[in-house]
Amino acid sequence: MDCVETADGLSRVYKVSVPAADIEERLGKRIDEIRPQMKLKGFRPGKVPRSHVLKMFGKSIRGEVVEALVKETSRKAIADSSVRPAAEPEMEMESDMEAVLEGTADLAYNMHVDVMPDFEPVDVKTLSITRPVAEITDEELDARLQTIAESNPQFTKRAKTAKARLTDAVVIDFLGKIDGKPFEGGGAEEHTLVLGSNSFIPGFEDQLVGVKAGAEIDVTVTFPEQYQAEHLAGKEAVFEVKVHEVRAPKTPKIDDEFAKGLGLEGLDKLKEMLNEQIQSEYTAASRDKAKRSLLDALDEAHDFELPPKMVESEFGQIWQQVQSELDAGRGDEEDKEKSEDELKSDYRAIAERRVRLGLVLAEIGQAADVAISENEVQQALIREAQNFPGQERQVIEFFQKNPNAMAQLRAPIYEDKVVDYILETAKVEDKSVNKDELLAEIEE
């Protein structure tokens, strides 16, 4: 193998070449390895002539050899130059690969690599971080209880002359027909329907607003084109409806009976669960704010050259998202007032910050022996798969077969563990704030 290295800042280009004779030597060794296991018609097992193997399978075996040589020589080139790649190398073939696979040309390629910058990460023990914290108040707990009560109303019978309103419940018998014939699943007796709940076919509940107890009406609706029952999709149906009662919603009293109606032991248990839920929200918000403070401190403490390809890749992802948001009319109002050049400058600065912080966190994590377990990765993979109901197996297989996708899954897990390590090591001061200050969104 011959290798010539050129450097430009943190970018390296390795020109690697392997003589065709070396490839043929490897090819011969590979054929000798597989011949004993080969079984071809007309030959005894393991006795296929070398020349016949070369004639029949030479090109494909040579392809395997070339692939292995690229991996081997690229690793050696990097190891010999004593650099740490900041990302996966990019390969650019210079050879006519068809000629290489025919055995008539040398293998030659260029390998582009961004290397890690040489910097000393800050001593995390010297960092001072402010972490906002808030106490759960009785008012907050009462407000949550009230919200739950309002979301679970009790219904009381209204007068026979009362007209049904949105949010009222009606007790009805109904029978659906298409072309005058009842269809399966289209009928029920004494069914309780909350008007405005959108639990029935679109348009059904609207036509019951204003009905009284004892009313008998026909409700005409059209099933959606994408309705789950294909034999009903897109068809018009007439429902014969008889109204038995109209019931008004009433916010229930918050007591033990109410809690038991939610499947809990009593009001104390409901309050305990709510307290845990609120505390979990507060803890997550406190950590998010502390993490932001930490990242700001790390960014301010470091200034070093960044690998250009990493910055370009990060900027490309950010810019694609920004353009999508702007095209959809959802862009930030301030962004809409800026020129494209101004926007690109702003978001390139964000890309540089992200790359810088990623490198700093990686160095700190490596020095502290921070690692993630396979169980943590598997749990993250399962959570990701659950975002695609019915396609879980395909999602898992995709990640398992794509190292880059799996690396993207691992990255935030590792980052969070490094952040937790720093927050445990740095000087962290808790600052009491109110709920609104704690839960206010962080400006990105």
Image (spheres, helix red, strand yellow):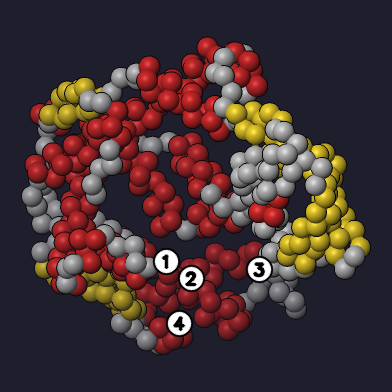
Q: Which residue is mark 2?
A: 64
Residue 161, position in %: x, y? 73, 39
Type of the residue with mark 3: Met
SS for callout 2: helix
| Label 3: element kind | loop
Furthest toward the front, the residue is 161
Residue 57 position in % (x across, y down): 58, 78
Badge 2 amino acid: Glu
Secondary structure category for the residue under label 4:
helix
* Residue 101: image tag: 4
How far across and down, in percent of the image, does residue 218 sit? Answer: 80, 57
Identify the residue shown where x is 64% and y is 28%: 154
- Would you place residue 157 above or below residue 383 in this image? above
Residue 129 quadrant: top left
**Residue 347: % across, % down:** 20, 61
Q: Is tag 4's residue or tag 3's residue first in the polypeptide sequence?
A: 3
Numbered label attached to residue 68: 1
> Separation of disc 1 and disc 4 at Cα?
13 Å
Which residue is label 3 attached to? 38
